[in-house]
Amino acid sequence: MKISPHLNLAELTRSDSAKRNGIDNTPTPEHLENFKLLAEKVFEPIRLHFGVPIHISSGYRSKALNQFIKGSATSQHCSGEAIDIDMDGSASGVTNAQVFNFIKDKLEFDQLIWEFGTDKNPDWVHVSYESTGKQRKQILKAVRTNGKTSYLPYK
């Protein structure tokens, strides 16, 4: 099923954890509508700007899958409002930092997170788009200290 011109449902629901553990990861109709909005406002502009396939490392997470992987109870992945993008290893030459900066500078979004990595390139980029249209434009950097994740304001 196509969500947008360059995004299909299989890309958004793919999960090795769900597959290995028999967890249903099927979005509700409402969550599908949220993904269509996120694709229109965030994914497609990224894809068109860079002109290369954009790799989603995490999309939809059913409540059961999110609990299994110990995700945040308030994760926007569970409502079809968030994706994680990881361009590492892509033959395109586009970096996670380039994707992060394009989103930060050019797009509307609810939350944008530089996920771990170095000061030059995150390990991946988390981006969400609030389906109500009320975007916080919150920009954070995820860091690990003594094995615990903290979210700091991005500078």
Image (tube, rainbow, N blue to C red):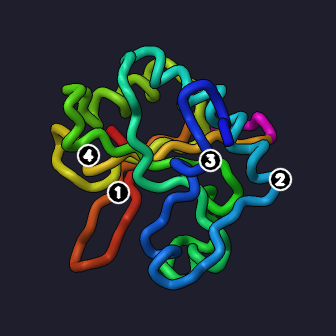
Q: Which mark sits nearer the N-terminus, 3 or 2? A: 3
CB contact under 8 Å: marks 3 and 1? no
Q: Which mark sits nearer the N-terminus, 3 or 1? A: 3
> Mark 2 sits on what residue?
29
The segment highlighted magenta reads 132-136
State the image coordinates of residue 81 (x, y, percent, origin top left): 65, 48
Q: Nearer the viewer, mark 2 or mark 1?
A: 2
Q: Residue at x 37, y 33 (%)?
A: 100
Q: Which mark sits nearer the N-terminus, 4 or 3? A: 3
CB contact under 8 Å: marks 4 and 2? no
Q: Quick one: 125 or 26, which is closer to the camera?
A: 26
State the image coordinates of residue 79 (x, y, percent, origin top left): 70, 57
Specify the amino acid type for callout 1. Ala
User: Under tag 4, what secondary structure?
Assistant: loop
Q: Quick one: 88 or 136, which is closer to the camera?
A: 88
State the image coordinates of residue 91 (x, y, percent, origin top left): 20, 31
State the image coordinates of residue 93 (x, y, percent, origin top left): 19, 26
> Mark 1 sits on what residue?
142
Vertical order, 96 against 49 (above or below): below
Specify the amino acid type for callout 4. Pro
Query: Badge 2: few (under 14), some or many (20 or more) residues near its Cα, within 10 Å?
Result: few
> Mark 3 sits on what residue?
9
